[in-house]
Amino acid sequence: MALMAIAIVAMSFLSYELGIVLGDIGTATKYNPPYLPTKCHGNRQDQFPPGNLFVSVSEGLWDNGAACGRRYRLRCLSGNDRPCKDATIDVRVVDFCRKSPCPSTILLSGDAFSAVSHSPSAKINVEYIQI
């Protein structure tokens, strides 16, 4: 059992170091305030997680509202002019994309976007996995 745990940890480390993708791939853009009201919890301020690391999701992730409160681990993979920071963040779904068509798979709050990208207006490719 311990040997299997060591093997899993080693594979996780190697896959990260080699750039192997373990989650889903999509695109992300930044969205700006006002963030309220949201489709998940209206005008409640307590829906936003500490650090304001939250997202609005497109139809593919929305799941008829079941996405509300879901958490994702996300990192930037690529984009024009090398926008990615070497960071992985945890975000919470608080809203459904208000634009039609939605400009990306995930719309990141300003704080979430600046945590993973150097470029404030870039459309980036991201890896995300539900946690």
Image (cartoon, helix red, strand yellow):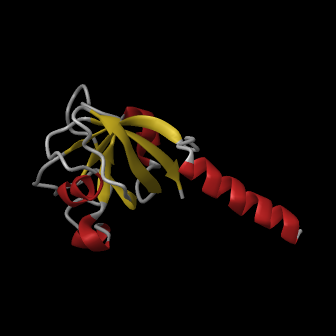
Q: Quadrant of the C terminus?
A: bottom right
Residue 9, given in percent of the width and then of the height, sits at: 70, 62
* Residue 57 to residue 92: above or below: above
Query: Residue at left 25%, top 43%?
Result: 83
Residue 81's x, y, as percent? 21, 35
Q: Which picture quadrant has residue 78? A: top left
- Looking at the image, residue 60 lies above or below residue 128: above
- Residue 64 showing in the rendered view: no
Which is more toward the observer, 10 or 101? 10
In depth, the one of 56 and 109 nearer the eye is 109
Q: Residue at x 33, y 55 (%)?
A: 40
Taking the spot 46% from the left edge, 56% from the top edge, the residue there is 73
Between 76 and 33, the one nearer to me in the picture: 76
Question: In the image, is 104 to the left or to the right of 32?
Answer: right
Rendered location of residue 46, percent (x, y): 28, 73
In the rendered picture of this protein, how many numbered marks are placed on residues? Answer: 0
Q: Split into 4 quadrants, where in the image is the N terminus?
A: bottom right
In this view, 115 is above or below 108: below
Quarter assignment of residue 110:
bottom left
Q: Residue furthest top?
A: 101
Residue closest to the eye, 38 or 3: 3
